[in-house]
Image (cartoon, helix red, strand yellow):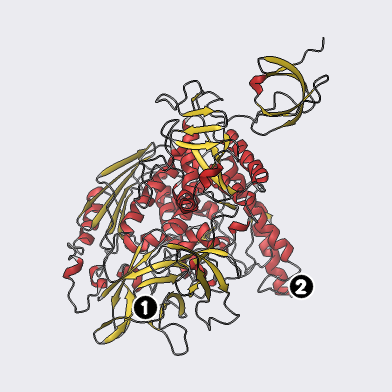
Amino acid sequence: MSVLYLTCDLDNVVFTFTAEEKSTWQFSRLSNFHRDNGKDCFVLRQASEGSTTRWVLENQTGQPSVFGTPKYSGHGPPFRGSPSPPRGMWTVWGCPFILSDTMPQRDAIPSPFTFEVPFAKMHFHEEGRLGYLDIEVFNVGIEDEHLDEILLTLRKVLVNLAQRPEMVLLLRTDARAAPMPSMRHVRKFLAFIQKEVGTECVLVGRGSAIVLVPSTFLGTAVLRLVQLVQRMLPAPYPQAIVASVEEADAFLANIAKEYPAMAHPEEYPESPVDLRNEVERREVPENQAQASGPSSSTSIASPARKRPRAEEEAPGAGKVQVMAGLTRNVLVEPEEEPDDVILVQESPSTETEPCLMGRADLLEGVPCELCGAKVAFSEFVVHMSICQERPQDAAEVPAADNSEDITCDVIVPFSSFVEHSKKHSVEDQEGLEPRLLGCTIGELADHLAAHKVHDQWLDREMKSSTSAVDITAQLVEMARAGGAGLPGNRSHVAVGDAVLVRWSDGRWYGGHVRAMPDVGDGGGGEEKISVAWDPPFAQWAPERVAEHAVIPRMNQPREVCNFDVALQFVKKLCSMKDRSSKATKLEVVYHWTGEENVQKIVENNLKTPGSTNADGSAVQRLNGDAYGKGIYAATDLNYGKGFGRGLSCAFLCLAIPGHMSQSQTMKLSSRDDSFKHGPLRVYRTSEQVLPLFFTDSNSSAKLAECAWDIADLLKERALGQVKDEAEFRKGARVEALWQGAFWKAEVWHVHRDGTYDLKWQHPYHFWPAELRVSPDRLRRYDES
């Protein structure tokens, strides 16, 4: 019980807390290097008098702030004669966590394994509680897609280690042959570390060695860039830049000695065990460069920072209570500035001890380690290389102007920036322009315009990227915009609403809202909703539950696009790029299912019977496979509605047909990707289907239009195709095949899926209109 385990319910990452003083447990899964820099000092302690809960999780890094509370306000089992924190569900950073005194057990990823892309090779293996990750960088240009792939693999390794509380990681990077990366890729890497794996780096990172020999101009430039990145985003563990693989191994071996095999959880003695003794307490040689000082910036972020959907479902101030090292943004100037402009910082930072290099730092210039001059960021690498080889020539590279802080929001060319800043200094000295400490109302429009220009740079870069990840990001953004305002999206509920409630066993039960919390009802604690249970649990007593544990029932239209599922869909489509346009012609289809399956489909995608969900549960066969084993859907929303078992909503999906077998075979064959029988479709794999929305008949038309817009994006960006023009326009006279003969008709509506609605011509104008006619049943009418 001297060690408690706090597990995130979203990704199963584990935080450990070790008993310290009486009734106090301190966060201990971090290096002493990081702790000595005064970062991430989290403490489980008893709450102060007057609080609505008896225990809190408090961040004592700076000004103490509570960012975690238990679901139930009681005590846990006694420890050394005093109460201990309550086990079970907690809310931390606005997200669900589980506190336990039993070490979570998670399967390791298969190792050793090697993953290779053209510009780098990654090898991972484990020895006891140590994970070793070796990365070798080749002298090959970096492509967006390959960078995304290796970052995704790195994230899988870090997350898996973070899910196993006994594991730590040592990293060795051989960059002797590394090319000079573009600043676009540097920005992407910095964003990845800050937003995707910052928490995991703190939990498992224990040492890093970079092999780099600056014997050439290029090598020197790469070295200076690495050092710049280390200063901008210091690691939460010791780092060394060495000249050989042997030196790197020796550095990491010295760290590895401090991590002997860990005792089995049941073997922990009752006396306090301080996990901090298991991490760094040694001197690092002075000649080995390392991320040191009080500004270590890779800190723990709330899961909500990495998961936009969690942020939408459980908004709250608790989610922004992240560490100082992650509350500021790094601004790296674009590799190619569209109009040769920069942004001028609007006001000095109010932080007393900034952890990252922000805009103001870049505008003042980056200090050169050799000559001490502040050099403009865009000239830093060149200046450092020249300064090392020919110090007398370093002055040729312009240093950044060191004038007074500038507080305007004017966008100026690089060539005019020094003159512009001097002008401000003169005006300040003459008193012609008062120095502003913030953005005034009159300047707000210019300030927002400056931000808009910067955002346009980023948008332009993303929209020109062919990376599957960037395409997916735009796809998800379009789906979120298209589904905005749907009633099922809301995370709040009202009295009388039918809801699903997450009970203490972690499962969801049906109920309805009896009463909402009154204003101030929480008394500073977490507000709770009163719910009554629906049959078959109507006999249960009504209960007050936390707001984050209550969501609307799964029978309202909402947006359900999952980024991971969308990424697999995009990759599948890209892999079929060389196939015929018919095989890659996307379809909008609908899938009906029972309410109990909705959330699993949102999280895991539609699956074929016999496959496995992410939580390990098997996908059962519910409705047979008369047309073959696969995923069943239809192009008509009303087709298969009975499979919804009372629901009024179905999944609206995009689908990739691939090679499609026709109804003559009456079954999906082994050589086909999908099967078609009237409106019915059967798809062989999950990657061919992408759920976008959960829709009813009232919302389906609008959401289908959004789905077709997404299809156009994929056609252009993933396949490199131009948007198809309809073969027949509205009002065109055609002949339509019906009952074995062609009859005169007029096109009166063109659908996005390529089908047509027809009105019959005289003398058959009294016949009912023919809807959704496929183009292969039409031919042009020759009036001659």
Q: Spot the residue most to the bottom.
A: 49
- From the viewer's perspective, is 577 left or right of 416? left
Residue depicted at 74% across the width and 29% down the height: 769
Residue behind mark 1: 44
Does the residue at mark 2 contact the one at mark 1 (Cβ under 8 Å)?
no
Q: Which mark is residue 293?
A: none
Q: How crowded is mark 2: few (under 14 residues within 10 Å), some or many (20 or more)?
A: few
- Residue 524 in picture, x, y percent from top left: 52, 82
- Residue 510 in picture, x, y percent from top left: 49, 63
Q: Is residue 751 above or below residue 485?
A: above
Of callouts 2 and 1, which one flags the residue occurring earlier in the amino acid sequence?
A: 1
- Residue 159 in picture, x, y percent from top left: 36, 55
> Which quarter of the picture shows residue 260?
bottom left
Can see residue 124? yes
Task: Identify which amino acid the numbered label 1 is placed on.
Answer: Leu
Task: Identify which amino acid the numbered label 2 is placed on.
Answer: Leu
Residue behind mark 2: 432
Q: Spot the residue most to the top.
A: 784
- Residue 278 in picture, x, y percent from top left: 23, 68
Q: SS of the residue at dot 2? A: loop
